[in-house]
Image: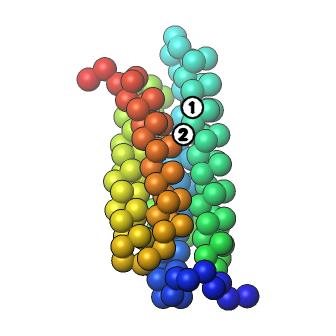
Amino acid sequence: MKVNIGVPDKHLQAVANRLQVLLADEHVLYTKTRNFHWNVVGDNFSEMHLFYEKQYGELAEIIDEVAERIRMIGHFSTGRLGDFLKLTNLVEQEYTDKQTQQVKYLLDDHETIIRSLREMITEFADKHKDLGSSDFVTGLLRQHEKMAWMLRSYVTK
């Protein structure tokens, strides 16, 4: 059934397209975080294992919310791993069990997503007149800023 929420179809399509890229970014970041959770080593293994688990849990919720937002505005959500890898702005780095490098990789990814979300906030509101999606990504911005701050607190240099 067609969505009739006061935003033209072409604008909803443009918003959905940007959200598909965000969905891909969130999936790649989730997978990286989960990988580091499995492969962390060091004298604070337990702390970092739980820290990564908390972060990937939050990312799992974000993934679901982004996919549902795409559905709310009348489009189907991407769900294939190959599509995520084609759409993502993030880069898969080499495997590492070094905590400092893991944290830096995740921090870089969160900051990439944060910059993208900042662009979406104004684009969705001003260009596409979709205040609901603008508000939605504003909430995600706050979540990623908090996760980035937590990661940044582990980086000493």
Q: Residues within 10 Å of mark 2 (few under 14, many from 20)?
A: many
Q: Which residue is mark 1?
A: 52
Residue 29 x, y percent position in the rendering: 51, 48
In the displayed structure, would residue 8 be above or below residue 50? below
Amino acid type, mark 2 = Thr
- C-alpha separation, residue under disc 1 versus residue under disc 2: 6 Å
Comes first in the chain, label 1 or label 2 = 2
Q: Residues within 10 Å of mark 1 (few under 14, many from 20)?
A: many
Viewport quadrant of the C terminus = top left
Give me the residue at 60% from left, 51% from top.
62
Give me the residue at 61% from left, 76% from top.
73
In the displayed structure, would residue 30 be above or below residue 6? above
Extreme-left residue of the structure: 157
Tags 1 and 2 touching, CB below 8 Å = yes
Closer to us: 133 or 92: 133
Residue 57 x, y percent position in the rendering: 64, 40
In the displayed structure, would residue 35 be above or below residue 22? above
